[in-house]
Every structure is written in C-alpha cells, then in structure tokens.
Image: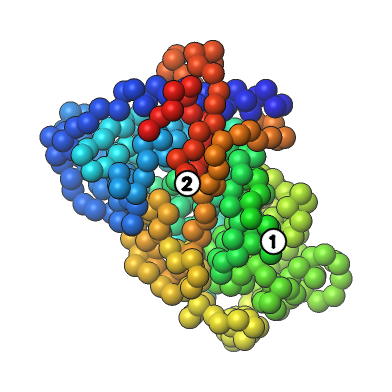
Amino acid sequence: MDSQITETEIILHNQVFQMSKDLVEVVLEVYYEVLQELGAGAYSSVLRAHNRATDQTMALKLLKKSRTSLSGFLVEYCTAFLLSTHLSIIGCYGIAFQTPEHYVFAQELSPVGDLFSLIVDQVGIPEEKVKRCALQISSALDFMHKKGFVHRDFKPENVLLMDRECHCIKVTDFGFTRLKGTAISARSRTISYMSPELYQPGIDFLEAEPSLDVWAFGVLLFCVLTGNLPWETAARTYINYSAFVDWVSTGVGKVPFCWKRFTTEALKMFSKLLAYNPTQRSRAAEVMHFIDLPLTVDLSADCIEEINSTEEEYSTEPSASDSMSSCSDGSQTESSSPSSKSPTNCSHSESISSKSISLSFLMASLSGGSYSSSEEASVDGFEMMTPVLWDVNATGQKFITDGSSLYIGAEAEVS
C-alpha cells in the first residue's frame, strides 16, 4: 500500500524532473491565435486559443512568473497531466512551455462554462442533472484519491461543463492539489466549503486527506440541489451547522429545518459525506449508492421561502449578503464580499468567481522532509505517460520546497 503511493510519488517526481529540462521559451502569438480571455486572477489567466499547427482550439492556462515558481508550475501541470486519463477530469494535452512573463500549459476547452453558472439562486439545479453530475464527480474524486492525490479546492467553479444538460462534466484546477499525507496549513477562515478540521483553534498544520474533498463534495451537492449553502462556515457559532452536527451525531430529534427538503435517503448520504469526524466520512464513491433514489421532496413555494429566510436568521455571525452569494467560493479570505465571475475558474490562489466565499487555502510552507500515507493508491490508468516517466530508478526521491508548497523534486533542485 505504502509502496504504491511511493510509486505515484516517484512517477510525479520524474515527470517534474523531465519537464524542468524540456520547458522551452516561445513567443505565444507565433504558435497560437488568442481568441478570448476566459478569466483572470492575481496568479493566472485562462485563454481560449487556436493552435496554428494543429488547427485545434484549446484552453491555455497562463501562470505569472512573478507569482509562481517554475517548480510550482511543473507540479500543477504534471498533476493535471497524470490525472487527465479519467473521463471526468479535464483533458491535458501534454503541451507546456514558457514565455518571458508566463508559464503555460494547454488543456481541453469547456464549450459551456462551469457548474456554478447553472445554479439558480434559492432553487439550485434540477435533480436529474445533479445526479448526473454527482455520478461523474464521485468517480473523478475517487480516482484522484486512489492515485494518492487530494484536490483541496473543490467547488462548483472547478467543475466544467461539456454540455448544459450535464451529460459530460470535468473536474479541473489542480493548483492546490497535493499528494495524500502532505503537510498543509490550517487557518480559521469564513470559508463555506472548508471542513471543520481545517480551522480548529491551535492547529497550524495537518495532513492532506481525501476526507477534505469529501466534505467539500457534500457541501457542493447541497448547494446545487437547493441554490443555497447549508451554512456560512462549519463552526458551532452558526446555528445551522451546530444543529446539523447535533442531529447527525445523535441520530435523534427533528431534522434541522433547512434539511427538510431532502428525502431520508439523501439525509443518509449527507450524513456520510459531512461526518464531523474526518475518519468517519465515506469515500466520494459512496454517492453512487444513492443515484437511483429520490433526493428531494416537493415543497410549496411558501415553504421553500420560509426555509431560506430561516437559514439567514439562524446565523449568529454576519452573513455574506444573499443566499446565492454564498453558493460557491472565491478569492477573499477574511470576508465574503462578492468578486467578479468568469465562465472558467483559472486562478491559482485567487478565485474569479462571483458572489462567493473564499476557498483560498494556504499552501504548505516547509523546508523538506517526509510524510506518511495510508490509503491504497494504485498507478494504473496512467497509460498516456511516456516511457521515461516509468523509469522510477532514474533519480532518487527528494522533497524540496519553494517556500509556499511542498512537492516531490529531483535530486538536483528545480528552480
């Protein structure tokens, strides 16, 4: 089990090492016709561009050299490439280069936008579409977790649509993705998709675990089914959250008011995804057992309005504004004021999503070392990798850091 995760680490390490030698500098406009800017943040931007050589339209993600190290870029690109074999993870074309000001790699283009764009405030998305999304997302997350990766920035803006009926969707944006067991910073923030263990008082660091993504997945499902978030923050100071934890923990008493729109089967699903204790959370794939079951009950418009108004009153801390303003997360870290929204989330640490609450995690800042892993993670499914990436004996393992993130590096430090 540990040897399988080690093999994944070495594969990632070797790909980073190889790319560090092969990353050429080009004039972007010579090889690509830029058609449209899909979004921009403090660290990066995404362009819709036409490859002049292949006559193909694709998305180019540009990361600013002034805000991103070469090693940090290579880890994000190589992670995206390794995971792109899954049908519900955005395709990565194996094209990476640099310009005088940016590091760049090419990805599959989403013709529609992201999942956030479908959410109707106070209403959500039709249940059948949600079920199609849930099936594909759970498969993608389970794939990632079995490979030993934790996404750490899971939200509606990071789920891209290939069609508006959600027959094909793709998980994207691996700027915060880390190998399972990597030390990550924990900080108390008003962040709606963050699991409770990430901002416990007195805890500065914890290990990246799949349970972080599972929690965010549960919050996302509530959001897309209702058009609201279940709570502003997973903290006891919020009555909505406190009531849910008490009900799930004891299994007795009345269902919390804002959860009355869900069936018994859906409540069972949420109790598994949103278990307070991270060791008791289910795998993302657990959702597959509920896909064929009804998740919501028909409520009158007056009842839904009452639920929504009650949700706002229940918070004992300042609210974000309206319910949909909290329906996905963005770039702020202390406040929840809206920011601009673009069809594609392209930010590396600052989101460009509108009406949203921050999910800006700190990246681990360590000086090197080792970490442990316990979950099985095979490396089958990396069929698209070139032979050099399978040469696990080519270089030794070594952890190096750029001061903002922990990653696998080569024997010679990449900078």
Graded by Cα atoms within 10 Å as few (under 14), some (14 to 19) or many (20 or more), the crowding at tag 1 reads: few
Residue under the point 37% across and 61% down: 352
Mark 2 residue type: Ser
| Rendered view: 259 above or below 309 | above
Residue 303 visible in the current orientation: no
**Residue underneath mark 1:** 202
Looking at the rendered image, the quarter that the N terminus falls into is: top right
Given residues 208 and 386, the one toward you in this image is: 208
Q: Report the front residue among 66 and 322.
A: 66
The residue at 65%/35% (across/down) is: 371
CA separation, marks 1 and 2?
21 Å
- In the structure shown, which secondary structural element does the residue marked by tag 2 occupy? loop
Q: Residue 215 falls in which quadrant of the image?
A: bottom right
Q: Residue at x 37, y 26 (%)?
A: 19
Residue at which label 2 appears? 404
Q: As shown in the figure, which amino acid type bears the numbered disc 1?
A: Gly
Is residue 406 something that shows in the picture?
Answer: yes
Give the mark, 1 or 2, whose residue is nearer the N terminus: 1
Q: Is residue 313 left or right of residue 56?
A: right
Residue furthest to the left: 30
